[in-house]
Amino acid sequence: MYSDFFNSLKYQLQKELPGLSAQLKMAPSIRPGLKSEITNLNAAVLILLYIKNKNINIALIKRSEYNGPHSGQISLPGGKFEQIDVSLINTAIRETQEEIGINPDHVEILGSLTPLHIPVSNFFVQPVVGLYKSEPSFNPDKSEVEYVIELNLLDLIKPENCTVKDFNYKQTLFTAPVYNCNGYAIWGATAMILSEFLEIINQIKLKL
């Protein structure tokens, strides 16, 4: 099931990517004013796709509360590049294993998206797309992840689930596009990454 779709997705990811223009469709209004020095800090996140209840699902996480810029946010699993990592693809898989307990041997890498600079943490983030070859049993590390969010990919694609919301960051009011799915508001860098991913999905002329 869905083998044609995943083969088409893998093929699309080898072609020229939509890039920054697709990412900026979901950028918060405050983003142009968030200046930071260019660094060599690198990180990677994993867009983990899998089949559950005959649907294509995607795994996101609710980060635990901590003293940092992404405390409590909804995000993709992942983290910073470490010296033990052979590549940023390895970073994405390793961090996802640590955060939500996946088996790395079950991940088939389909490709990568356009790297995104995140001003508030000053990381360059490499999004990686992977297919989990079985139905995952998540075991989140509670020190990093409050819980795992499992979303039907079709819900993310629905245009009516993309709206605009008001936010307050460090006493600055701004607006941001959000994906509203199952009561969760996905915004910021995660929404920008998903925006490019969904644009690629929409290029695939196959019914999900």
Image: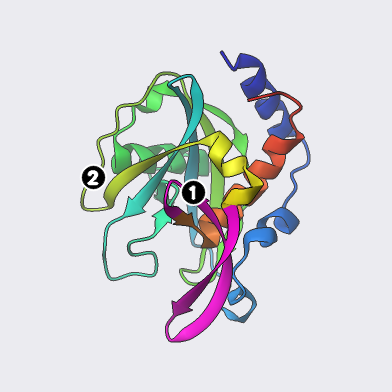
Point out the residue furthest to the top here.
1
Residue at label 2?
141
Check disc 1: other Cα within 10 Å, few if <14, some if 14-19, many if 20+.
many
Is 116 a magenta residue? no
Q: Is residue 176 above or below residue 10?
A: below
Horizontal relation, residue 201 to residue 96: left or right: right
Q: Amino acid at mark 1?
A: Ala
First in sequence, mark 1 or 2: give its number. Answer: 1
Q: Which residue is mark 1?
A: 44
Q: Position of residue 129 (x, y in %)?
A: 55, 36
Segment tinted magenta in the rendering: 162-184
Q: Quadrant of the C terminus?
A: top right
Judge by depth and name the residue closer to the eye, 53 or 24: 53
Q: Residues within 10 Å of mark 2 (few under 14, many from 20)?
A: some
The amino acid marked with disc number 2 is Asp
View extreme (left): residue: 142
Query: Residue, x 47% and y 26% (percent of image)?
Result: 50
Q: Is residue 37 visible?
A: no
What x and y, as percent, mark residue 113?
63, 44
Q: Is residue 160 left or right of residue 61?
A: right
Report x, y in % for residue 173. Answer: 51, 82
Left or right: 200, with 106 as reference point: right
Mark carried by residue 140: none
Q: Residue at point 59% right, 17% down?
A: 2
Measured Cα–Cα span from mark 1 to mark 2: 18 Å
Q: Estimate the x, y position of residue 5 in percent, counting from the top left.
A: 65, 22
Residue at 60%, 73% in the rendered image? 31
Q: Which residue is most to the front?
A: 160
Asked whether 37 or 157 is in front, the reply is: 157
